[in-house]
Image (cartoon, rainbow, N blue to C red):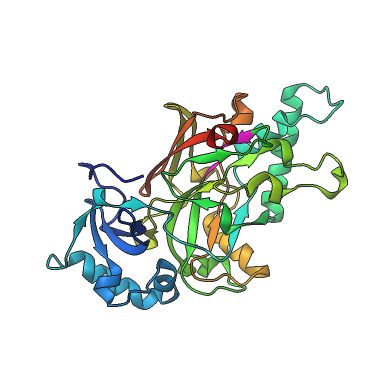
Amino acid sequence: MSVKAAPASPLFAGPFALATLSAPDGPAFPALVTSEGQVVDLRLASGDEQLTVRRLLEGWPDVLPRLRDLAADSAVARRPLAEFRVHAPVEPRQVFQSGANYRQHVIDLHVAHRAPGDDRPEAERRAEAAEIMDRRAEEDLPYVFIGLPSAITGPYDDVILPAWAEKPDWELELAAVIGRPAHRVGVEEALEYVAGYTIANDLTDRATVFRRDMPQIGTDWLRSKNAPGFTPLGPWMVPAESIASPDDLRLVLKLNGEIMQDESTKDMIFNVARMVSYASQSAHLLPGDLVLTGSPAGNGMHWGRLLQGGDVMDGSVTGLGAQRTRCVAEEAAS
């Protein structure tokens, strides 16, 4: 899908962002996009036909000043964004996903996923969930698991709902993009390793989150979260320097025009710095990797309304732009 016209208002916070674009029938290429909707082909600007956004991120401390200069140089050739298709802005090698990181979201899920035989009043189960969240915060125990890059799709691409997915759900999230190799970094320095931020919608099939055949082994994230296209990403990677505070951003998801999620990242139990630091204690984070920071309250399980063919999701995060994806049932797609 192409962006039809550059809007009158800025596309995102700051003067520029990174994107991956393509002309009709052309290869994808890394681009600098201005907030007014003008495109600089970074292959031409650098003289490197093999350049990718990931390669830019691998040299981020040196690349960022050059991007600032390009954005400010009116003599650099630019073309309207409307001429191009917008893809996911980065191709990560690793995707780190945070679960149970918004207090109200987890309480709602705890109530929605009533265990068989649990007939306690809703207020009692909400109080129990709140106590669990408070204890997790006190014990400083984030929850991170691994996603597949093959689940990523563009911010305007259709999402195919697999025929086996009984309860597909939305989860709008803030995603941090890593800009320097990070291993065992502290919370105080963790944001220094973040190149920028983008939007992710981390779709989940609620029916397959927990293994019914072997409940003792717990969650099945491969099955429930990693179908092709289950992670619409983008449209832009906005440099971290253009975002005043990742811990005070508004996330809004609309389903067919109706607001479902509307929450601030203030409600996160563990902030972005803590999530990046935590992931780096076990893994070696690489430039271009994503750290998804969890989703706020207001998913389909809360509303009793799951995704189905024909649904349109609009997701936005303060300063990061907006994405729009249409759901297509697998039978219709085939």
Q: Is residue 100 visible?
A: no
Q: Nearer the viewer, residue 317 or 219?
A: 219
Q: Main secondary structure of the magenta part?
A: strand
Left or right placement of residue 53 versus residue 310 in this view: left
Q: Position of residue 221 (x, y in %)?
A: 70, 49
Residue 77 is one of the magenta-drawn residues: no
Q: Residue furthest front?
A: 334
Give the vertical position of 114 relative to 148 (above or below).
above
Q: Nearer the viewer, residue 83 or 320?
A: 83
Q: Position of residue 32 (x, y in %)?
A: 29, 62
Residue in the picture at 74% in, 48% down = 220
Q: Position of residue 166 (x, y in %)?
A: 68, 32
Give the vertical position of 115 relative to 151 (above or below).
above
Q: Which residues are magenta?
A: 168-172
Residue in the picture at 42% in, 27% down = 257
Left or right placement of residue 134 versus residue 40 in this view: right
Q: Position of residue 278 (x, y in %)?
A: 63, 63
Left or right placement of residue 17 versus residue 54 in this view: left
Q: Quadrant of residue 110?
A: top right
Can you say which quadrant of the picture contains the N terminus? Answer: top left
Residue in the picture at 39% in, 61% down = 240
Q: Quadrant of residue 22?
A: bottom left
Residue in the picture at 74% in, 32% down = 113
Give the vertical position of 318 relative to 279 (above or below).
above
